[in-house]
């Protein structure tokens, strides 16, 4: 007697689609023919779980089953569920990773791709590569017009031009699969197509292999690659160089090369997206009196103008002196965080002048006018003392 679909998956009628998928995945892994070769009972349980999933994962079929039971999904001829592999075209998303993604019974049965990537001509596309490149902070801002690196990779054999065949020969049609790349295999109640073991799915074999690459069509070598580093690139960003990965197999196209950038820290500038920040020490007389002060930016010298009485913690912005925008024109801004520059050593004359500024009355007595510099800037307390007397 056929069991209720919810009972098969061990779920209640309120189960969500995600719960149905998880329950089916667990049963499919447990009773999959690859995991239980020759086990008829496991095959039946696998088929039962697949049937339950096909109904409960389809909103319309699930609604009819909830209302009418097994009769709800019978066709006009009275036939119930038919095990049709074509309706499980998306199952590789559920189980492909558990059974190798390609080449296994499950992926062959349900049309799973995965694993190797085939080009239009039937060849296998070359692998993508990644190269971690460390660059200076200045190069990340200004870019580099021509950068050269050397990478190890599989390149197409120059003697056979990637065919794998000796000179004057060519690949022959595989007699085992007759060029299809797959052969039919029957396991229990299932008949499926699997990758041809002789040609490994290529559909052809090499009778006279190339002496340089031994029929592989590729050889290992260190290859120089040139490219341009765009201005404004940041750490963690990748640059894709199309066709600079490993060579393909059996006429397949090459993979891509990805450059992963690592940027060295700078002792002066700190990056925040497209803006730059730096601490700038300014002599305190300039903050008091105001004036122009030269500043070194990543693009050369500029001058900022400070007004009289500028606070010591003021932030000054220099527009368009930051990081170039990768996908837009212009640059970010440079923010200067002002700090008071205090000298560590003074000559005896300089120290005397500073003391005079700090205590102007000591230099000229109580009757001296407000001749001190600090007295002019911050006011004198001479009048206050007279009032107290």
Image (tube, rainbow, N blue to C red):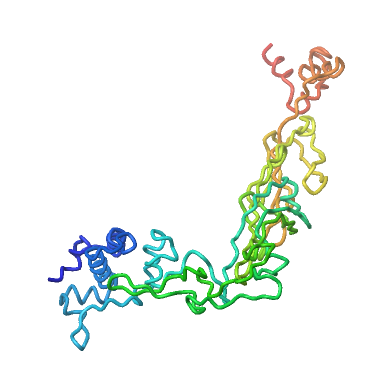
**Above or below for 206 versus 99:** below
Q: Is residue 146 left or right of residue 66?
A: right
Q: Residue at x 76, y 40 (%)?
A: 307
Residue 49 placement: quadrant: bottom left
Residue 100 placement: quadrant: bottom left
Q: Is residue 70 left or right of residue 110?
A: left
Q: Residue at x 77, y 21 (%)?
A: 344
Q: Is residue 295 left or right of residue 36?
A: right
Residue 289: % across, % down: 79, 34
The N terminus sits in image quarter: bottom left
Residue 275: % across, % down: 67, 49
Can residue 327 be seen from the camera position used here? Answer: no
Q: Residue at x 44, y 66 (%)?
A: 103
Count of marks overlaid on the render: 0
Residue at the far bottom in the pictured view: 76
**Above or below for 214 versus 111:** above
Q: Is residue 94 left or right of residue 334?
A: left
**Above or below for 12 versus 78:** above
* Depth check, front residue: 309 or 118: 118
Residue at the far left in the pictured view: 1
Residue 332: % across, % down: 69, 53
* Depth check, front residue: 126 or 35: 35
Residue at the far right in the pictured view: 349
Residue 167 placement: quadrant: bottom right
Can residue 139 be seen from the camera position used here? Answer: yes
The C terminus sits in image quarter: top right
Residue 316: % across, % down: 71, 43
């Amino acid at each position: 007697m056929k069991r209720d679909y919810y009972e098969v998956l061990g779920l209640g009628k309120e189960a969500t689609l995600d719960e149905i998928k998880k329950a089916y995945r667990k049963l499919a892994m447990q009773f999959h023919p690859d995991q239980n070769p020759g086990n008829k009972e496991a095959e039946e349980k696998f088929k039962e779980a697949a049937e339950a999933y096909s109904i409960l994962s389809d909103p319309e079929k699930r609604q009819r089953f909830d209302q009418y039971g097994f009769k709800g999904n019978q066709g006009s001829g009275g036939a119930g569920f038919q095990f049709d592999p074509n309706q499980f075209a998306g199952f590789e998303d559920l189980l492909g990773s558990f059974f190798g993604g390609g080449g296994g019974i499950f992926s062959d049965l349900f049309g799973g791709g995965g694993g190797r990537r085939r080009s239009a001509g039937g060849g296998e596309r070359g692998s993508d590569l990644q190269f971690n490149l460390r660059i200076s902070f200045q190069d990340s801002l200004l870019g580099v017009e021509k950068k050269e690196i050397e990478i190890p990779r599989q390149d197409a054999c120059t003697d056979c031009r990637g065919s794998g065949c000796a000179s004057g020969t060519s690949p022959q049609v595989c007699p085992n699969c007759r060029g299809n790349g797959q052969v039919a295999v029957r396991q229990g109640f299932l008949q499926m197509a699997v990758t041809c073991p002789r040609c490994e799915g290529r559909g052809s074999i090499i009778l006279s292999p190339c002496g340089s690459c031994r029929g592989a069509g590729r050889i290992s070598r260190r290859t120089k690659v040139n490219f341009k580093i765009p201005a404004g690139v940041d750490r963690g960003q990748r640059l894709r160089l199309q066709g600079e990965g490993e060579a393909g197999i059996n006429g397949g196209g090459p993979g891509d090369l990805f450059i992963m950038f690592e940027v060295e820290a700078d002792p002066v500038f700190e990056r925040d997206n497209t803006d730059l920040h730096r601490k700038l020490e300014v002599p305190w007389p300039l903050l008091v009196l105001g004036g122009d002060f030269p500043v070194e930016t990543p693009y050369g010298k500029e001058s900022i103008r400070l007004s009289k009485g500028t606070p010591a913690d003021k932030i000054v912005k220099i527009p368009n002196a930051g990081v170039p925008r990768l996908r837009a024109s212009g640059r970010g801004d440079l923010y200067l965080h002002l700090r008071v520059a205090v000298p560590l050593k003074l000559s005896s004359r300089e120290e005397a002048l500073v003391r005079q500024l700090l205590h102007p009355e000591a230099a000229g007595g109580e009757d001296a006018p407000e001749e001190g510099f600090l007295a002019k800037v911050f006011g004198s307390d001479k009048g206050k003392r007279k009032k107290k007397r």
